[in-house]
Image (spheres, coloured by chain):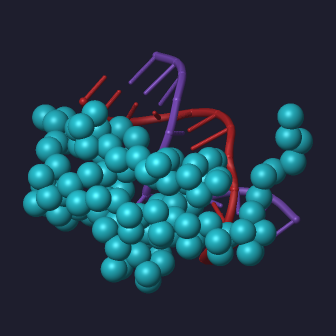
Chain colours: A cyan, B purple, C red
Amino acid sequence: MKDYPDRMTAEQAGKFGEDVLNIVSQIPRGRVTTYGAIAAWAGWPSHSRMVGRILRYSPEAEALPCHRVVNKEGRTAPGWSRQRMLLEEEGVLFRSNGHVDMNRFLWEPE
DNA sequence: TGCTTGACAGAAG
DNA sequence: CCTTCTGCCAAGC
């Protein structure tokens, strides 16, 4: 039972950021993955919100396929309607409710 | 130092 | 299906 917060040191935060960007760069065209999964693979399962922060504010993310990251329900980022267009151009199909069909397009690394 | 804000997740109504 | 709440944790103010 952890009785203290599992916080990151500045150094760990830096590595976490690198790992997140590295993972995003590996998402195949026409596939998507989730914030929580990326955080878990980077070693910090409870930091899914930090993944979103990094993709939105880190300049490096500009050159990466960050439009291939959606939340676990397949919803696209709020206030970024262009994300859906980009995904549809790659062949990602959306359900009638506006969510990505995660059963078919969710990608997970080894 | 303390309260608020999210590109989240999960549960509840 | 949609909204709201709680847990989460770094950043901003």
Q: Is residue A32 above or below residue C1?
A: below
- Residue A35, image x, y percentages: 46, 52
Residue at screen point 62% across, 47% down: A45
Instruction: Tell me: A76 left or right of A11.
Output: left
Q: Residue furthest front?
A: A110
Instruction: Tell me: A80 left or right of A18.
Output: left
- Residue A84, image x, y percentages: 19, 56
Residue at screen point 74% across, 74% down: A10
- Residue A50, image x, y percentages: 56, 61
Quick one: quadrant of the N terminus of chain A? top right
Is residue A13 shown to the viewer in this render? yes
**Which one is nearer the viewer's eye here, C4 or A52?**
A52
Residue at screen point 25% across, 43% down: A105
Is residue A70 shown to the viewer in this render? no
Q: Is residue C7 above or below residue A66?
A: above
- Residue A64, image x, y percentages: 35, 73
The quadrant where residue A88 appears: bottom left
Residue at screen point 31% across, 68% down: A65
Instruction: Tell me: A25 left or right of A43.
Output: left
How many marks do you count on the picture?
0
The quadrant where residue A85 appears: bottom left
**Which one is nearer the viewer's eye here, B10 or A87?**
A87
Q: Is residue A65 above or below residue A40?
A: below
Q: Residue furthest bottom?
A: A59
